[in-house]
Amino acid sequence: MGQYLLNRGLQSLIVLFGVSAIVFYSLHLTGDPAALMLPPDASREEIDRFRQAMGFDDPILVQHFRYLAGVLQGDLGTSLRFQRPALDLVLERLPATALLAVVAMAWSTALGFVFGVIGAVRRDTAVDLIVRVIALSGQAVPVFWLGLLLIIVFALRLGWLPTSGYGDLEHLVLPAITLGAYYMSAVTRLVRANLIEALAQDYVRTARAKGLSAWRIVIRHALRNALIPVVTVQGMYFAALLGGALITEIIFAWPGIGRLAVQAIQNRDFPLVQAVVLFAATVFVIANLLVDLAYAILNPRIRLS
């Protein structure tokens, strides 16, 4: 286990270095942020002073080395727009995004498991047909269209919930439904497909021959083996949500990391964009590691090496 964690740690550092390098050089290909940050009537001398103060006049390799040295010390740079540490801005938005991600993942996972198990157990029946229609509909409907539809129906027409904002639990309902609908459908299809495959295995036939009840076979035997692909998808889904549910946060004016990323890109705020991307990459790396460790827990036959 120790050797495995060491190897994965080294691989993770290489991945994060590659991501940071790609983002850093890609951003600098978009042009000089001084022209955007300063007023249109700024003189050439003012632009040059700004570029010198921010270090943009140094060779790009020097800038990249300086950025990496800061990252190793926990300094991801200072936001050009907000004049505050970029990491602090990301961490400020993290609670809002984490709350939305946890709620969306919780209800979509619970309902997806229920629908998936029912669809697998009642395979090729009317109930299974309904489950498949729900699952396909959830993945076919665009997130932005679903969000706007929910706002029109439940906020504007019925007046039950607020259209946007962040604060009370009422503000969380529509964004969480919008964000979780796609993942609920994906979990439903994945659980159904893997559970159907598991129910066809020899150990299930043996359990039936011993007289075990159908639901005991499903819950205690088949479902556990069907969980491994689901855990993989869930880990990646949650990492994506925590990295920033961009479209949902924009539609509902949710003050999360996704909305912060859009603002940073619009302002050509290099340090802030780099901080958001590096944070999202770190979340994905950690999620991958946790998923691999969960494999060994769910299936003791899997060994980490």
Image: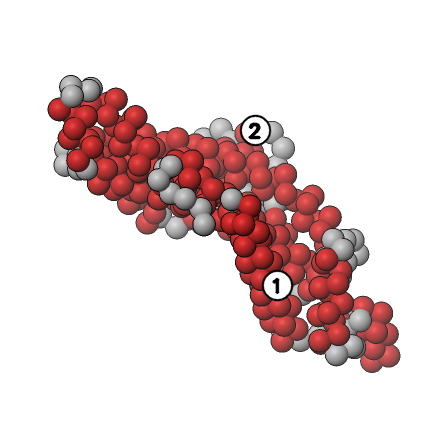
The three-letter code of the residue at mark 2 reads Leu
Please give the label number shown on residue 17: 1
How many marks do you count on the picture? 2
Residue 11, compared with residue 237, is above or below; it is below
Please give the label number shown on residue 153: none
Mark before the other along the chain sequence, 1 or 2: 1
Q: Is residue 193 left or right of residue 182?
A: left
Name the residue rendered at 58%, 39% in the picture: 98
Task: Give residue 291's position: percent from left, percent from top.
Answer: 46, 44
Q: Residues within 10 Å of mark 2 (few under 14, many from 20)?
A: few
Asked whether the residues under the numbered discs 1 and 2 touch, taking CB atoms below 8 Å apart as contact, a structural biologist would say no
Q: Is residue 132 left or right of residue 293?
A: left
The three-letter code of the residue at mark 1 reads Phe
Seen from the viewer's position, the closer of residues 195 and 104 is: 195
Seen from the viewer's position, the closer of residues 113 and 15 is: 15
Task: Give residue 9's position: percent from left, percent from top.
Answer: 58, 53
Q: Residues within 10 Å of mark 1 (few under 14, many from 20)?
A: few
Name the residue rendered at 24%, 23% in the picture: 215
Element under label 1? helix
Name the residue rendered at 34%, 47% in the picture: 139
Task: Give residue 261's position: percent from left, percent from top.
Answer: 61, 55
Gap in angstroms between the C-alphas marked 1 and 2: 39 Å
Displayed quadrant of residue 181: top left
Name the residue rendered at 32%, 49% in the picture: 140
Displayed quadrant of residue 130: top left
